[in-house]
Image: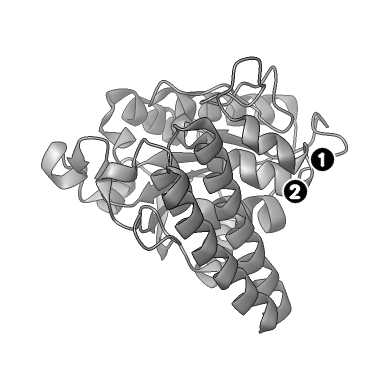
Amino acid sequence: MTASEKKQLAINACKVRMGIIEGTHAAKSGHPGGSMSAADLFTYLYFKELNVDPANPKMPERDRFVLSKGHTAPGLYAALALRGFFPWEDLKTLRHIDSYLQGHPNMDMVPGVDMSTGSLGQGISVAAGMALAARVQGNPCRVYTLLGDGEIEEGEVWEALMFAHHYKLDNLCVIIDNNGLQIDGPIDQVMSPYPIAEKLVAFGFETAEIDGHSFDHMEAAFAKARETKGRPFAIVMKTTKGKGVSFMEDQVGWHGKGPNDAEYEQAMAELNQKLAELEAM
């Protein structure tokens, strides 16, 4: 990855975070914390990794992405809008009555969304099914799914992992956002899923553990995922909940609420300053 490519990814990630703040502020609700922790990942996927076309969002050979932790739709929407799937200004309609951008993604309404999600644990099952279907159909696409670290406390997740290993789904890449916090508190106090990587290895996955805010780490991990044959791949990315806004970072209270007017102004001021610094580099 060139320095200019990395710079542009950082600029785009900052804009994705701004879109998250815009949407959750306008909605007066939503899930900014986990959206912000995954903002770099959303950016890398839609601007580097995925084979997708905003002008043809249903092209059969496109890569599929399933947001298993569907409550972080504000982050997905911001990345899709920035990539050109729908107008940026529509982010401000998040969760409004009659808006197509509801609190969880709807595949029947939102261009670029491949699966309606929201019930935690179910997205990865669908992604595994998509990967098997692609193989049966001879479709060269790859399937990616993002889970929360609190979400993997769900039993259905591990059934899907067994399924993926059993069918040797090497076209499936599972990504876990390990920000350490869920709605009720730290994950290791609620129902610890640790050690995550070791569990994935025991379930037959090739794995990589990365800094989820490093594009270099993402590039190496996704390259390894594409090269891995005969078994599914999982990426455990260590992140900071609320990343990018000082008062949101590593604060469980920002799991599921929108910023008020004063908080919006502070968050946007910080992100605008960061954007200016990146653009001046």
Q: Is residue 125 left or right of residue 157?
A: right
Residue depicted at x 70% and y 40%? 63
Is label 2 in a helix, a strand or a loop? helix
Q: Residue at x 61, y 68 (%)?
A: 10
Secondary structure state at the residue bearing disc 1:
loop
Q: Quadrant of residue 81?
A: top right
Quarter of the picture containing the N terminus is bottom right
In the picture, the disc for residue 54 is 1
Picture colour scheme: one colour
Residue at the farthest right position = 55
Q: Residue at x 73, y 40 (%)?
A: 89
> Across the whole image, how many numbered discs are drawn on residues?
2
Q: As rendered, which of 143 and 10 lies closer to the eye?
A: 10
Considering every residue shown, the one lying at the far front of the view is 262
Q: Going by the image, does 74 lie left or right of 87?
A: left
Three-letter code, disc 2? Arg
Disc 1 marks which amino acid? Pro
**How many residues crowd mark 1 within 10 Å: few (<14), some (14–19), many (20+)?**
some
- In the drawing, does residue 18 fall left or right of residue 193? right
| Residue at x-position 72% and y-position 78% | 4
Work out whether mark 2 precedes mark 1 in sequence or the reverse, and give the earlier one: 1
Dot 2, how many residues are within 10 Å of its Cα: few (below 14), some (14-19), or many (20+)? some
Q: Which residue is at the front of the view, 98 or 233? A: 98
Q: Position of residue 238 (x, y in %)?
A: 36, 59
Please state the horizontal and vertical placement of residue 205, each as a whole percent of the image. 40, 46
Alpha carbons under labels 2 and 1: distance apart: 7 Å
Please say if 115 is above or below 168: above
Q: Position of residue 272 (x, y in %)?
A: 59, 66
Residue sitting farthest toward the left: 189
Residues tagged 2 and 1 counted as in contact (Cβ below 8 A): yes
As drawn, the label of residue 83 is 2
